[in-house]
Image: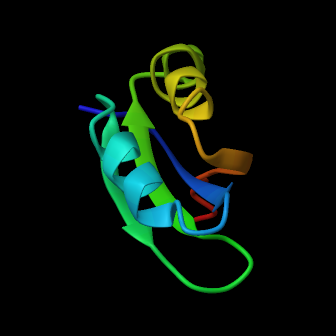
Amino acid sequence: MSAVHAYVLVQTEVGRSAAVAHAIAEIPGVTSAEDVTGPYDVIVRVGAKNMDQLGRDVIAPLQHIPGITRTLTCPVVKLS
């Protein structure tokens, strides 16, 4: 069970969003990876036991996928 969740907003090279989303979906800890339109090309939902594991096991491999030009990681917080 994941205790930490985040959304990762991904910008890709032109024409690479589908291939990038497919590659991201193969990473353990990725719940979903979907092509979208707008300033970002792929939105990813990820989860892990803690922030260290999230960074090491999910975010680091994601950032090495060919075709990605920029990522923005948004941790989910509970405000109530």
* Picture coordinates of residue 52, whole percent (x, y): 58, 15
Q: Please state if 52 lies on the left or on the right of 25 as rendered.
A: right
Whether 60 is drawn above or below 34: the answer is above
Give the quarter of the figure containing the C terminus. Answer: bottom right
Q: Please state if 43 lies on the left or on the right of 27 as rendered.
A: right
Q: Residue at x 55, y 68 (%)?
A: 15
* Picture coordinates of residue 71, whole percent (x, y): 71, 48
* Picture coordinates of residue 42, whole percent (x, y): 52, 65
Q: Please state if 35 lies on the left or on the right of 30 as rendered.
A: right
Q: Residue at x 39, y 23 (%)?
A: 49
Give the quarter of the figure containing the N terminus. Answer: top left
Identify which residue, 7 or 70, lies in the foreground.
70
Count of numbered tags: 0
In the current view of this chain or complex, which residue is farthest to the bottom?
38
Whether 47 is drawn above or below 78: the answer is above
Identify which residue, 22 or 27, lies in the foreground.
22
Q: Residue at x 63, y 59 (%)?
A: 9
Asked which colour scheme the image uses, the reply is rainbow
Q: Residue at x 36, y 42 (%)?
A: 23
* Picture coordinates of residue 64, whole percent (x, y): 59, 26
Identify which residue, 67 or 78, lies in the foreground.
67
